[in-house]
Image (cartoon, rainbow, N blue to C red):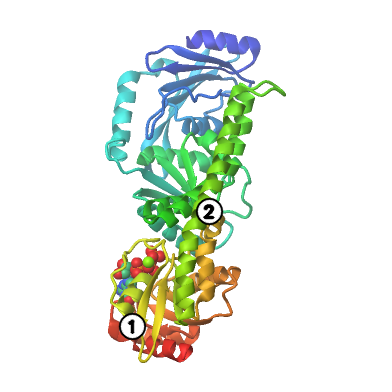
Amino acid sequence: MARRLGEISIDINKQVALLIDRKGDVEYVIVGSDKDIFIPDLARFRSGSGRLKGLRCVHTHLHGEPLSQEDLTDLALLKLDLMLSISIDAKGIPRDLHYAYILPQNRLGYSWALEDLTDIGKLDIDFTKFIKELEIEFTRSGEGFGIGKQEKAVLVNITTSTKEDAEKSVHELTELALACDLKVVDCIIQRKIKIDPRFLLGKGKISELVVRTLQTGADLLIFDGELTPAQVRSLTDYTEMKIIDRSQLILDIFARRAVTKESKIQVELAQLRYLLPRLIRKNTAMSRLTGGIGGRGPGETKLEINRRRVRDRIALLNRELQIIRGHRNERRKTRKNREIPIISIVGYTNAGKSTLLNNLTGNHLTAGDRPFVTLDTTSRRLQLKNKEAIITDTVGFIMDLPENILDSFATTLEELNEAHVLIHVADISNPGLEDQIESVNKILNSLNLTEIKTIVALNKSDKISSEQAQNIATKLNGIPISAIHPSSLFELKRRIEDLIS
Ligand SMILES: Nc1nc2c(ncn2[C@@H]2O[C@H](COP(=O)(O)OP(=O)(O)OP(=O)(O)O)[C@@H](O)[C@H]2O)c(=O)[nH]1
Ligand SMILES: [Mg+2]
């Protein structure tokens, strides 16, 4: 077959390639140029997580060159079993031979193995045995893909800012992924001067990424940041992987945590708003497949209906929210008539807001070392020296809170307007403390809440030395507290009393 390929290649002065399956059947014959080949879409062939495509590419090279960078990129991106080139001499006779395959684990920094043979006659592999053993090794390095229920994720951060910022951001993304019950198997950070608008990464980096997902048996890639619908599509097409972004991850956590009717509706609204522009995008691709030019294909009609359904659902949910809020407004009015001061706790997620409310009031709201435990606003009575107040716990904030979430929770958060005092709780032990305070302030600013008297409570000060805590408190003009030690709340209570009397 190699001889025949050589004759044809010389005749037409073009590379010729065969894609051969595991049974040895030729699935494709591809004619390229004299320097390269273009492999068609192989989406119909198998390739689950951590699995190879089941196809090997055997092709001719006309100028005695070894495997090209593009050959190796194809190997990785298409998850081919093997990429093999045969050099053809001027008479079309096969001479030396090069092949490469993806390694189950990086070896000496390389993600693939390259083999060169000076003579095609020396080629001696039992391919069936070879590929079986390779896949067994993949299974092992991916710790048995498909067996555990927990999905595995590779995190990807592409940034134009500093390495430290990227690392902090990835650390937070890891927490978010854990909160979604995902297992983080790898993190990739790439700093760039300019980010490619279509794929975000260079081709070489993407193929490296795909190899890493193969090696670790990962099921999905999570991009740190928000991807446009077009980016999700081109990345999905290119890598054949499930791609999600940070916003989607946050939406997912909210969906898992929502307990009350109100928060469930708010989260569903946020999800639908996130989905809507993406549905429209899919529509164009669909109509290309199903509809004729200018005509309304069946697929298009169906998606029109889907879009209308989404809009109808959004309208319905909005009406339900109105009703729920009506009830709450009543309650709030009675409170207002009695002129009870309201203190609202705000702050970054996981800062200890619920723990603080519990210890100030002797309540038992759910607290936990995960982001977004609290989604609902809860009010409790707070007995001060000679006054009674209402204290409320709210949903936590996060850097770059997705717009859809902020919109959906806007009305809940507007209630903060009625607060006489805000307690801004921040985690003093977190290396990102100042960034977190700033992003909370940004959100407070966008909600027009900067006029309200605010106390900065620097929580978890038990985790650092008291000297350190005092220094930070002076610098940021806050009160160090430890919500788990009620005895540390004395100063905070005194300040609250001062502000509401
Ligand atoms: N060491 C220490 N841990 C604390 C302190 N306050 C809270 N924590 C812990 O921090 C974690 C988060 O506390 P929560 O009260 O749930 O935080 P939150 O701000 O309500 O978080 P979300 O509702 O998820 O946004 C929990 O595991 C608490 O036990 C503290 O003063 N010191
Ligand atoms: Mg909470």
Q: CA distance from mark 1 to mark 2?
A: 34 Å
Identify the amino acid type marked 2.
Gly
| Disc on res. 457 | none
**Whether residue 284 is situated above or below residue 488 in the rendered picture:** above
- Mark 1 against mark 2, which lies toward the viewer? 2
Going by the numbered disc 1, the residue's amino acid type is Ser
Determine which quarter of the picture holds residue 446.
bottom right
Q: Position of residue 101 (x, y in %)?
A: 41, 30
Q: Which residue is mark 2?
A: 225
The residue at 55%/23% (across/down) is 39
* SS state under label 1: loop
With respect to residue 463, does 407 lie above or below? above
Residue drawn 38% across the image and 87% down it: 493
Q: Return the x and y of residue 125 as percentages of the image width and height.
A: 35, 20
- The residue positioned 58% from the left and 80% from the top of the image is 451
Residue on which the image places disc 1: 465
Tell me how many marks there are.
2
Nearer the observer, 144 or 230: 230
> Quarter of the picture for ligand 2?
bottom left
Q: Find residue 450 and report its image quarter.
A: bottom right
Q: Is residue 88 visible?
A: yes
